[in-house]
Image (cartoon, rainbow, N blue to C red):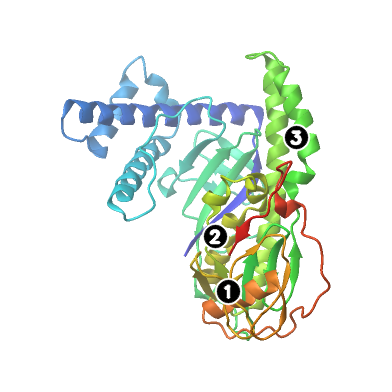
Amino acid sequence: MQLRYSFRVYPSTGQRAALAKAFGCVRVVYNDALRARETARSEGAPFPKTGDLSKTLITAAKNTPERAWLGEVSAVVLQQSLRDLDAAYRNFFDGLKGKRPRMGAPRFKSKRDNRQSVRFTANARWSITTGGRLRLPKIGDLKVRWSRTLPSVPSTVTVVKDSAGRYFASFVVETGPQEVLPETTPEVGIDLGLGHFAVLSDGTKIDSPRFLRRAEKHLKKAQRALARKEKGSSNRNKARIKVARAHAKVADARREFHHLLSTKLIRENQAVAVEDLAVKGLARTRLAKSVHDAGWSAFVTMLEYKAARYGRTFVKIGRFEPTSQVCSQCGVKDGPKPLHVRVWTCAACGAVLDRDVNAAVNVAKAAGLAVSACGAQVRPERVPAPRSEAGTHPTPKPLTAR
């Protein structure tokens, strides 16, 4: 499978100017190609092919005074921008045909976009020097902070500038069967939530770090400072970068937490089962901030690709499975319960069940895993409902959940 390895790069002042020029040229070629295709569509003309667009918008345009500066950057990145537009159209049409989730039509890129990127393929003859620097054509040798070793020779590299003004080099590498881990016995079901980020079917509860909630005071202060600055001023741009860096710090901490936990679960268990949560629906409720702070979708995506990478089994059960209504001991469905009910007694067998652990065991059983409730919390003391799970509404009301 293909993986991306990202590393922080530190370009010099001249290299930043060269990268900015490459970002601009790639953006112009992309917008010119998109405009040509939209014009052809509106006029009923045949859809322009990539080869024709390359001859017109790159080769011929370099000989004109208006686009002569296209020759100052590598031709490979300009060709790659046309391939990126092809991929955007292909994904859009595949979404209309039902082959993949729907997504919008390609849109014009703006120089004011917070994220800029440029991609170098093998044809660009980029390389990694013996000194550990990234050599890019017409840009120079970039200083890279290598945090780990690449498992194989990368095929492409993408240089990205994010909203916080940081630069990253993203390498695409191929991984082989040598990374498959030896088989192990444990199998686990995972119940994701807000009071606890994850509850495992063996009774383990993993607290939610709540990175956004913990950083809210600092974020509000930076956002207020940004709101007081005059639009278009250099001070406003400095304040914007401070806000972006504060948000990037929160996102980086959350991503690291997801990576560490997902890797630990995949390495220690032969099979992992999770529930397919309706994150988009939950994000429209009063729990929206807490749901986005948890980042369930990113975590589940990490579990899925790491299971495929290391030879583990990953199962995702349907979102309508009544995991919180069924007794994991006798299998009797006891009906929906409000969110403030964290411990309940089965009316059929009399077992006292922890709501989250019971749901995790049912997730594992629904996935067909050989998981029992051994080691899970049995007959725990009654505890009040966590305030964070009740949301941020001033007058919370009991909700009926599965």
Mark 1 or mark 2, which has the lower sequence index?
A: 2
Q: Position of residue 394 (x, y in %)?
A: 74, 41
Mark 3 or mark 2, which has the lower sequence index?
A: 3
The residue closer to the viewer here, 354 or 280, is: 354
Residue at 67 percent across and 33 percent down: it is 244
Q: Which mark, by number, is residue 207?
A: none
Q: Is residue 301 visible?
A: yes
Give the Cα separation between the discs numbered 1 and 2. Answer: 12 Å
Mark 1 or mark 3, which has the lower sequence index?
A: 3
Residue at 63 percent across and 70 percent down: it is 190
- Residue at mark 2: 277
Q: Amino acid at mark 3?
A: Leu
The residue closer to the viewer here, 220 or 269, is: 220
Residue at 39 percent across and 37 percent down: it is 81
- For label 1, the SS is helix
- For label 3, the SS is helix
- For label 2, the SS is loop
The residue closer to the viewer here, 69 or 293, is: 293
Q: Position of residue 195 (x, y in %)?
A: 73, 59
Q: Amino acid at mark 2?
A: Leu
Q: Which mark, by number, is residue 363?
A: 1
Q: Is residue 266 visible?
A: no
- Residue at mark 3: 219
In the image, is 350 to the left or to the right of 179?
Answer: right
In the image, is 282 to the left or to the right of 59?
Answer: right
Farthest residue in the right direction?
A: 381
Q: Position of residue 53 (x, y in %)?
A: 27, 32
Q: Residues within 10 Å of mark 3 (few under 14, many from 20)?
A: many
Farthest residue in the left direction?
A: 45
